[in-house]
Amino acid sequence: MNPAQSYILSQPEPWRSICLELQAIIKHTLPEVDEQFKWHLPFYKLENKMLCFLNVRKTFVDLGFIYGIALTQHQEYLVAGEKRKQLRSLRFNSLEEINPHIIRAVLEEAALIGRITKKG
């Protein structure tokens, strides 16, 4: 088992189920994504550029987007804060909060931004 999968499976519920659902949506939306384990978190790279990551916090799961500041869709769901300059995230407290349509739209836009961003 790879370290990213181990990280997800080692989480207590409901965080494990949330991470598994988000992982499935990421891989289904962007089948070419490369799942890696960096900075003790599951990271997803596209064309060798960091795209997003999963981070289990005390009270939520963060689906963070590296170039989140450039995202234009569903901004009402994107969280900044914590002295984040570029990063934005979608946060989930339960499986019921996961809306696959919103996540897919944000992932597709993030992938497009990542492809045109020169910085890797």
Image (spheres, helix red, strand yellow):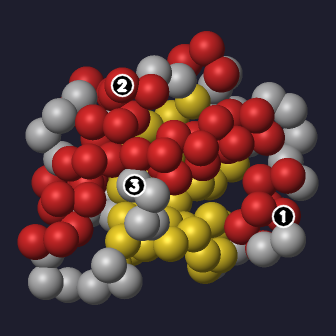
**Callout 2: SS:** helix
Picture residue at 61% right of the left edge, 14% below the top: 96
Place residue 111 in its image quadrant: bottom left
**Depth-wise, is mark 1 or mark 3 nearer the camera?**
3
Q: Position of residue 88 (x, y in %)?
A: 34, 49
Give the side of residue 46 with respect to residue 42, left or right: left
Q: Which residue is mark 2?
A: 101
Task: Place residue 94 in its image quadrant.
Answer: top right
Q: Are marks 3 and 2 in contact (CB under 8 Å)?
A: no
Residue on which the image places disc 3: 30
Image position of 101 with respect to 108: above or below: above
Mark 1: amino acid? Ser
Q: Quadrant of residue 3?
A: bottom right
Where is residue 43? Give x, y as percent: 54, 68
Residue 75 percent location from the top left of the image? 22, 32
Q: Nearer the viewer, mark 3 or mark 2?
A: 3
Nearer to me, 32 or 5:
32
Under mark 3, the amino acid is Leu
